[in-house]
Image (spheres, coloured by chain):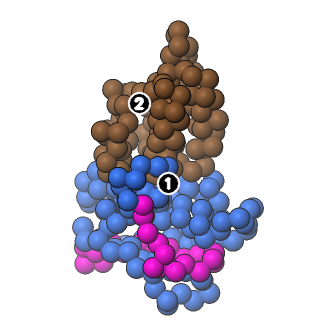
Amino acid sequence: MNISESKDFIVSTASLKKVRVFSREVFEKINMPQEQKDELVLAIAEATQNIVKHGYKDIENTTDKMQIKISLKNNELVIGFFDKGKPVVPENVQHRKLDDIKPGGLGTFFIKQIMDGAVFKKDQKGWVNHLVLSKKI
Amino acid sequence: MPYKVTEEGNISTVFLNGEIDMDVTEKAKEVILPLVDAGKEVHLNLKDVSYMDSSGISVLIESHQKALEQNSKVVVKEVSKSVLKVIMMAKLEQILNLE
């Protein structure tokens, strides 16, 4: 089964729920355990939250859009995130140490726990950042 | 974010509802943290919370740590399976007071 679906969202915390709804709708078409679908929705939500929280830090009420593209081919799920926020320096994307208990810094950890791969690509056309998450299912 | 607060003695129970993400965490903190600051023992009932991401987990951590500063505690109750999984992914099941 091959799938390729994408959708644009305004960069806003109010879009986070819409992103989850979109993701759940796409995953409904894919035969995999509900638990795995929930994990993938969380990974997508965390990556999206990072765009809103870090890519658009100190920028309020933007009309910019971000795009999320979910593709499935040969049992590999590839999820692309495109945005026009501040350029990401991949080396700076780190999660906090788990034994350093404090609020924040867990989103990237969750993504790494759930996904097989997380790579920032430089092939974006018209976008600033292109994050690709991947997972064999 | 729908919520309800009940009081019994020094215990305030906050019933949260729906999906806890970055869009609603400020509201959640506005409800929970003043109760913690007032020295209440706060019980967070999550039976009707179907989804929580890292920003929701941050609210749980911040509430827990503030309560410790007040020599009080926050108890997280009736956690749904999906939320418990996220708490465990963050390896917080031994840190937070889960009931």
- Residue A28 at x, y percent in the picture: 36, 56
* Front one among A34 and B90: B90
**Distance of label 1 from label 2 (alpha carbons):** 19 Å
Reading the image, the residue beneath label 1 is A104
The quadrant of the rendering that contains the N terminus of chain A is bottom left
Q: Residues within 10 Å of mark 2 (few under 14, many from 20)?
A: many
Question: Residue B39 is drawn in which quadrant?
Answer: top right
Tell me where the magenta segment starts and ends, as one range: A72-96
- Is B34 above or below relative to A82? above
Reading the image, the residue beneath label 2 is B76
Q: Residues within 10 Å of mark 1 (few under 14, many from 20)?
A: some
State the blue chain: A
Q: Is residue B1 visible to us here? A: no
Q: Amino acid at mark 2?
A: Val
State the brown chain: B
Q: Amino acid at mark 1?
A: Gly
User: Numbered disc 2: what chain?
Assistant: B
Question: Residue A71 is drawn in which quadrant?
Answer: bottom left
Residue depicted at 49% across the width and 89% down the height: A122
User: Numbered disc 1: what chain?
Assistant: A
- Is B61 above or below relative to A42? above
